[in-house]
Image: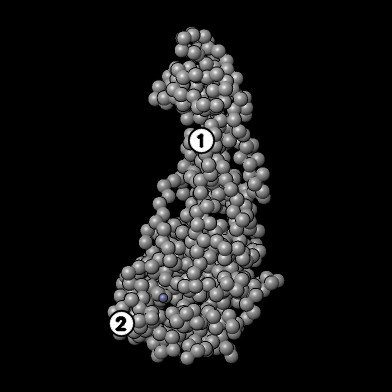
Amino acid sequence: MTHPARSRPAMLQPYSPLVRYVPILLITASPFAAAESNLDRARNSIASSRLQTHVEVLADDTFEGREAGTRGGHAAAGYLVQCLQQAGLRPAGEDGSYYQHFGNGFRNVLATIRGCDPPEDSSVILVCGHFDHVGFGSRQNSYGPLGRIHNGADDNASGVAALLEIARTLASQQAGLTRSLLFVFWDGEEQGLLGSKHWLEHPTLPVSQIGLVVNVDMIGRMRDRHIEVLGTRTGFRLRQLISRQNVGVDLQIDFDWELKANSDHYPFAERGTPALMFHTGLHDDYHRPSDDTHLLNIAGLEQITRLLVNVLWETCRPSPAIRFRANWQDESDSQRNQLEAEASRQPPRLGIQWDPADISAGLRVSSVTRDSPAAKAGLQPNDLVVALDGRKITDSQGFQRSILSHSSPVVLSVRSPSGSDVFPLTVALRGTPRRFGISWRNDEAEPGVAILTRVDVGSAAAAAGLRVADRLYEVSGNQWSSGEQLAQWLNRLSAPLPLLVERDGRLKIVVLEERITSTDSLSPKHNPR
Ligand SMILES: [Zn+2]
């Protein structure tokens, strides 16, 4: 698995709950006011002490590394069933039990929380993780030393602990859930995803009924609030779904595009079900006896559990089903880099350079770009540009912004180095006005999201801290229905204009200001000597 080092975002104001309220109002009808408080109760009852206890029990030497088919593996499955029963989940295995038997004494553990108002397609959310590990280790599955108990605290007692806590909290707030949840604890994952493959061969409910798979595997080693979420390309709008649920949790999310057959989400994605995996990265103790409880970040595990509860809650609401996206198979991280790449630089709209240090008398032109609109209009080095549309220039950045957003032509007031008179010069600007200085492209997997491909130097967008590859979700609290509509809004809506922007799974409000060069009229009083 790849772990690209990503720079930490350094922008902007946090997305305040007050502002969050606006889009929620747009999406949510009033009957769900009660459901919101159910969600709050579920989230507030998540406890790191219970997560810690689950990990300690599962990663204790008594379970001898939880190898599939061994007494340790069986004992671990027994612990899961006990917890699920206590939490009030119904059995969803064979013959009214929590188990699905397969292979050489292997057992998947299944339980369900029934939604109160199943949708017409009766789709179910499958949330899962593997509980088996590699026992005492072998040459095939351990980096050694062999012969010692491999407790697998991160792999995957961490994920199982989160699932147990999620099962308990959501079962206690069942009244707020529309769709049903199927919890599956896979056995035999470490031997080649045996549990999930067996389930797909012998499903306990029609596979077509699974609306989304959420798999957790190794989520106990979060560093710097950074997690990886894989599989968002297997369905439409999944990145947006997760980022919106990350508000208030505030994790930095790397949406990895590359899916590998390295955990139980994979066979589902291959068969045509949208499938996600949450993961906190590989480490030196991976598949070694040293993968122990004391090395886990339990507070981080609690944060991820909160994010998962938010995501599952949202997917269990009466929202439209998530559509599968077959194109994920053709995409890799290099396609992602292409999608997020900076667009080629636009030719300048005007084409002059000046020294921004001294603009007290106006902009002293230091050079003129060849064949640019400025050159064609006859501007020359050492000319002094004193006004734009009759307004005195007092601010270098403001002048840049005015040129970017101005319709063509523009009238500059210019004083040549030899003359003392100011003369008007009409310049036909190149290209279309770029009021705030951004360009974007669409992402077929995320309809209604614009990925920034250019942020013009000196633009309002640059001043607000926007960057290439930032995702635009909303303008003034609204979602657009087409690229044309977004372009219209950006051209016509009055500033200051609040944008909802996502970077690395975090939402921020960014306010674009519109400042014209100067409001001083070029009256005789202000006329420079
Ligand atoms: Zn493993």
Determine if residue 47 is in view. Answer: no
- Residue 146 got which mark? 2
Type of the residue with mark 2:
Leu
Residue drawn 30% across the image and 82% down it: 146
Residue drawn 46% across the image and 9% down it: 418
Residue 148, quarter of the rendered image: bottom left
Rendering colour mode: one colour
In the rendered structure, the answer to whether residue 217 lies left or right of residue 478 reads left
Near-viewer residue (57 or 382): 382
Q: Residues within 10 Å of mark 1 (few under 14, many from 20)?
A: many
Q: Earlier in the sequence, mark 1 or mark 2?
A: 2
Residue 350: x and y in percent read 54, 27
**Quarter of the rendering occupied by the N terminus:** bottom left
Question: Which quarter of the frame holds ligand 1?
Answer: bottom left
Is the residue indicated by label 2 positioned so its CB lies within 8 Å of ligand 1? no
In the rendered structure, the answer to whether residue 317 lies left or right of residue 518 reads right
Does 412 appear above or below 60?
above
Residue drawn 57% across the image and 72% down it: 270
Residue drawn 54% across the image and 59% down it: 239
Determine if residue 253 is in view. Answer: yes
Residue for badge 1: 459
- Residue 33 got which mark? none
Residue 116, quarter of the rendered image: bottom right
Type of the residue with mark 1:
Ser
Residue 143: x and y in percent read 33, 76
Q: Secondary structure at mark 2?
A: loop
Residue 200: x and y in percent read 58, 80
